[in-house]
Amino acid sequence: QVRLVESGGGLVQPGGSLRLSCAASGNIISINAMGWYRQAPGKQREWVAAITSGGSTNYTDSVKGRFTISRDNAKNTVTLQMNSLKPEDTAVYYCNVDRLVTVLGGTWVREYDYWGQGTQVTVSS
């Protein structure tokens, strides 16, 4: 059974930094893209950043230049470094894997759309 576990959220003042991490565990052969989403109170979940297995990155406009996504393919981890945080960055942040290959009953299978449990990020003075 594949699981995604996030860590690193918390309370920070405007202008501060936080580093979120997500570790994928289980019988994983390979992972395609990994990414981060967030959901603020009363709003829909929105995409924040993504990184391919080859290291190509993409960001939503509101975080460009402030957030950096990276991954360690050997450890199946993805990290989101968040700098110059603003109150509007306050949300629950979720790690996502869009596609992976795992082993079930000795067979390689492709599975889609895994999510972590979420970690709270609060930016407030």
Image (cartoon, rainbow, N blue to C red):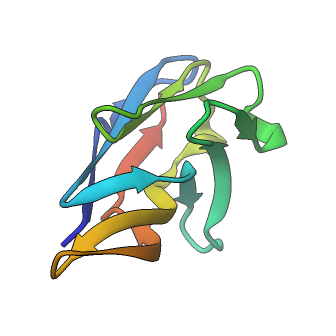
When the figure is inspected, residue 18 is found, relative to residue 91, above or below; the finding is above
Q: State which quarter of the image contains the N terminus.
A: bottom left
Left/right of residue 39 with respect to residue 95 in the rendered view? right
In this view, the residue farthest toward the right is 61
Q: Position of residue 50 (x, y in %)?
A: 63, 45
Q: Position of residue 42 (x, y in %)?
A: 60, 74
Return the residue nearer the eye: 106 or 64.
106
Which residue is pictured at 67% across the width and 22% down the height?
66
When the figure is inspected, residue 103 is found, relative to residue 56, above or below; the finding is below
Which residue is pictured at 40% across the width and 52% down the height?
30
What number of labels is visible?
Answer: 0
Residue 74 found in image quarter: top left
Residue 94 found in image quarter: bottom left
Q: Position of residue 116 (x, y in %)?
A: 34, 62
Which residue is pictured at 28% across the width and 57% down the height?
28
In this view, the residue farthest toward the front is 106
In this view, the residue farthest toward the bottom is 105
Return the residue nearer the eye: 53 or 46.
53
When the figure is inspected, residue 75 is found, relative to residue 92, above or below; the finding is above
Which residue is pictured at 77% across the width and 44% down the height?
60
When the figure is inspected, residue 5 is found, relative to residue 68, above or below; the finding is below
Q: Position of residue 32 (x, y in %)?
A: 54, 53
Left/right of residue 15 with respect to residue 116 in the rendered view? right
Left/right of residue 37 with respect to residue 97 in the rendered view? right
